[in-house]
Image (cartoon, rainbow, N blue to C red):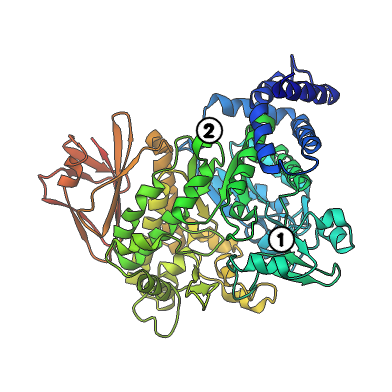
Amino acid sequence: MTTESLLHQKTQELISAAGLDETKKDKGFVERLYPRLPLIHRLFTEIYASHPDAENQFFQFIESLIMGYKAREKALRIRDAEKAKKGIWFLSNELAGMSLYVDRFAGNLKSMPEKLPYLEELGVNFLHIMPIFESPEGESDGGYAVSDFRKVDERFGTLEDLISLRKKMHATGMYLMLDIVLNHTSHHHDWAKKAKAGNKGYQDFFYTYDNRWIPNEFDATMPDIFPESSPGNFTWNEEMGKWVMTVFHSYQWDLNYTNPVVFREMLENILFYGNLGVDLLRIDAPAFIWKKTGTASQNLPEAHALLQLIKQCVQVATPGMAILGEAIVAPKEIIKYFGTGEFIAQECDFAYNATQMALQWDMLASGETQIMLNAQHEILKKPYGTSWITYTRCHDDIGLGYDDYMISQAGKEPYQHRKFLKEYYSFSDNQWMSPARGALFSSNPKTGDARISGTLASLCGLEKALIENDEFSIDLSIRKILMMQAHSIFLGGLPMLFYGDEIGYTNDYSYQNDPSKSYDNRWMHRPIIDWEKVARSKKEGTVENQIFSGIKKLLSIRKEKALFSDLSNISWLSPHNIHIAGLVRRMGNDRIYCLYNFSDQAAYLTWYAFREQGEGSEFLKDLWSGEEFKIGLDQEYLIIKPYGFVILEPK
């Protein structure tokens, strides 16, 4: 009997033991499983071939897959089928997201349903709820130090509250996105507690060592993630009498995926989230999940193999759930998280377009677009059938992670250019030339590396303008905010707003008075929503109203035009003006030009830029302003006002 026949036979026995009906109600499941079974087996054995109990572990793994499917409720199976009929459902131009902390936005999960109409009015139908599972207060890392993957933290509510919210969201056509932290757990997790108590099996769930010999080998090539607040990659645990790997913070213990039991346990958690009704699962920090001495222990081939295996399993058991890999890495590395070789578009469905996000801020500070254009040959490698999360900022810092050669090719010295950007966005007494108000995060004195904190509004100058009561600067800041959002919304991918940005929240410095947050200035851009301020979004002429209504209109334009679906249908215009970033989206004979002026001066673009794209129409209409332009006859150039933009459709 061949290996494939043995696999089929043993799997069939497990399916039968689980009480599934292969010919009727569970036919779809087995039709998804059996064709993928050889590949699932191959991936598993490539990763765990050297494990002494590999075969037994594999069939336990398959059993977990079967039970994950069995636990899926009927309504979610129906939703899976509806999504399958749409094709690749998540590429749609009709999706628009917002990321938020439920406690800081609504108080708790039980209060969230009453806030859904506000999101619907804005045009948001895809909700990313930031981490809500149990994590110790004071050592939570914003919820990314999880002590129980299946218990909602009582600060936010209960699992029943979450399920109730999801059902209400699905009933109104909304989608849910949640996080899972694969790389580590809190040291208060039950597995870590058992490891501390001396249980060798659970010590093998983590990277634990009696002495510094192997930790020193890791440290020789692994960078510090938080050099200011958490230097080094290992922490001594007195209870256990061992060193434990803690790449992020001392209270976050890295999981050991060389142990197949760890992978199986975490797969069960992934399927549990799928069965909560999650539409998009955000895998936090996937670049770090495999460790190897002599390397940076980031972006290793085994990490990609684990993600490919996860993707195959999700397609079998919870096929309506898409996967987002939160890999904030170099441009050429990000692309690999969509899959390579035979796994193209078979790894992560989404990745953050962190490169383009950072380049927006580069363009805003410098007023020039060459560096951004120098990165496009990497970004445009994204395969069809996958998508970006596009955004101006998120809960995290803004890292300047694009490559030095992209800066050099624009005629700039990389170190000095990054120094300029850091100084432009970080507030200091010497920052006379910049309206931005932000702060540097995770500065590394050894390398000079640092990242940027601050809200969208504050980094666009609104905080300074409001303090100075400067009406001209307030107007200019609002223009910057809307231009940045427009660039993200029409770029190609699923636009993800960050809560508070839709009404122009500026930096909140109260985090400095909270000992559990004062060491982390990212809390300045994670506001507690004041619903009286939100109410001002309905009052004509207020700052809140101008920003809210502007973003609402942008999302409406996107939803009206199918070519804004992510069909890998974007190309960039030649840089006839270094201050203007111009792109064209096409579908069949339809096309729309999106042009953004990142300069504080009016920018002129020759009409030849459109003829160069084969444009034969005589008229172009700006979907944003309603203005019509007659190509080349009314005037020699298209003129875009400072920090302005146009969304041009041929008539």
Q: Position of residue 562 (x, y in %)?
A: 40, 34
Q: Regarding mark 2 in the picture, which secondary structure is present there? A: helix
Q: Regarding mark 1 in the picture, which secondary structure is present there? A: loop
Q: Could you give the CA–CA distance between mark 1 and mark 2, rounded to whole angstroms?
A: 32 Å
The residue most toward the top is: 23
**Quick check: 326 left or right of 354?**
right
Query: Of callouts 1 and 2, which one flags the residue occurring earlier in the amino acid sequence?
Result: 2
Badge 2 amino acid: Trp
**Label 1 sits on residue:** 145
**Quick check: 17 left or right of 108?**
right
**Quick check: 369 left or right of 379?**
left
Q: Position of residue 372 (x, y in %)?
A: 34, 56
Badge 1 amino acid: Ala
Q: What numbered label is drawn on residue 89?
A: 2
Residue found 51% across the figure and 77% down from its top: 446
Residue 123 visible within the image: no
Q: What numbered label is drawn on residue 557?
A: none
* The one of 475 and 449 positioned closer to us in this rendering: 449
Q: Position of residue 549 (x, y in %)?
A: 43, 52
